[in-house]
């Protein structure tokens, strides 16, 4: 897929590279149609290169800096939608007047050398609340997990330019007077689906329901092979809080550990409830 949207539209640029400043950048009422993560320059080594998040709207393209965590050498590329409209069931439905139970996100994506970068992985998070240092929500990661050697939840490493998909759940705890990140990633048997590969287009649909049901379908648009999963999350320690969230996030971490110049593109993004 050829993506020339940035060349055809104006770019609004933030003046700072931290999360607080990014929050002040123009936040349009519509959802982004497409999002691109990419480094500003190719300099091998953790934390050596800056990076940008390009968000495509009907009025043009907004450029944001990647978010930096002061406690780590790396930065995170984050597209976070703080909330979506959550309708209620109509009159006549057994749950009339109650809010719809399942958040749905669909999009297509294409990675360019992302899966060749050791440790780099993309997170797709629904029922989300995200900052540069922690997340809440449920979803999946694709790429390389950065789990310690021998961790029972680690998937085998695929060939160069390929990656696995794994469900993950995120929450926070308060310790030493600050909010700290926690998460859990499921390993086998969720490693068994076909590998994903760079330079291919994929269609994604993910559902996250009240009570922690996570389901997703990731389809290779070239050969129609599919990665699917359905599981009940009983791990998240903020489950009730997460059930009340309506946002979603697309993110990438450890993108600065560059062994290859990369780009991650999401397009045809659509969010809703059912």
Image: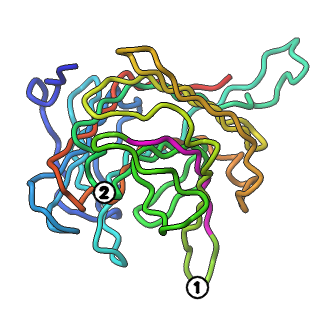
Question: Which of the image's four quarters has the N terminus?
Answer: top left
Please, is residue 172 above or below residue 197 in the view? below
The dominant secondary structure in magenta is: strand
Please, is residue 229 above or below residue 124 in the view? above
At x 35%, y 58%, the residue is 119
On the rendered structure, is 114 left or right of 238? left
At x 77%, y 52%, the residue is 234
Closest to the observer, 264 or 130: 264
Crowdedness near tag 1: few (<14), some (14–19) or many (≥20) residues, C-alpha within 10 Å: few
User: In which quarter of the view is residue 264 placed?
Assistant: top left
The part of the chain drawn in magenta is 163-172
At x 73%, y 57%, the residue is 235
On the rendered structure, is 22 left or right of 138? left
State the CA–CA distance, disc 1 to disc 2.
33 Å
Residue 101 place in picture, x, y as percent: 74, 31
Residue 129 place in picture, x, y as percent: 54, 53
The residue indicated by pointer 2 is 118
Please, is residue 127 above or below residue 235 in the view? above
Question: Which of the image's four quarters has the C terminus?
Answer: top right
Residue 151 place in picture, x, y as percent: 56, 65
User: In which quarter of the view is residue 104 placed?
Assistant: top right
Q: Say if the magenta span includes residue 148.
A: no
At x 82%, y 26%, the residue is 97
Could you say whether the residue bearing mark 2 is in a helix, strand or loop? Answer: loop
Could you say whether the residue bearing mark 1 is in a helix, strand or loop? Answer: loop
Q: Say if the magenta span includes residue 165.
A: yes
The residue indicated by pointer 1 is 177
Crowdedness near tag 2: few (<14), some (14–19) or many (≥20) residues, C-alpha within 10 Å: many
On the rendered structure, is 52 left or right of 19? left
């Amino acid at each position: 897929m050829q993506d020339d949207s940035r060349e055809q539209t104006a770019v609004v640029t933030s003046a700072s590279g931290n999360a607080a400043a990014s929050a002040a950048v123009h936040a349009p009422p519509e959802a982004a149609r497409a999002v691109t993560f990419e480094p500003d320059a190719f300099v091998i080594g953790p934390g050596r290169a800056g990076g940008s998040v390009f968000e495509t709207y009907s009025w043009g393209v907004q450029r944001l800096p990647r978010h930096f965590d002061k406690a780590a050498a790396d930065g995170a590329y984050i597209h976070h939608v703080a909330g979506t409209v959550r309708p209620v069931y109509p009159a006549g439905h057994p749950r009339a007047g109650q809010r719809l139970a399942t958040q749905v996100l669909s999009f297509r994506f294409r990675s360019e050398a992302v899966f060749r970068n050791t440790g780099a992985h993309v997170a797709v998070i629904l029922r989300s609340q995200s900052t540069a240092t922690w997340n809440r929500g449920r979803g999946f990661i694709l790429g390389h997990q950065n789990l310690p050697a021998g961790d029972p939840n680690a998937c085998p490493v695929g060939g160069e330019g390929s990656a696995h998909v794994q469900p993950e759940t995120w929450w926070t705890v308060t310790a030493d007077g600050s909010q700290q990140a926690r998460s859990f990633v499921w390993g086998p048997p969720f490693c068994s689906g076909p590998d994903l590969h760079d330079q291919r287009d994929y269609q994604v649909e993910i559902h996250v329901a009240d009570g922690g049901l996570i389901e997703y379908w990731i389809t290779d648009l070239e050969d129609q092979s599919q990665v699917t999963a359905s599981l009940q999350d009983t791990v998240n320690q903020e489950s009730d809080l997460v059930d009340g969230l309506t946002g979603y996030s697309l993110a990438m971490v450890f993108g600065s550990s560059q062994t290859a110049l990369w780009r991650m593109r999401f397009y045809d993004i659509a969010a809703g409830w059912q």
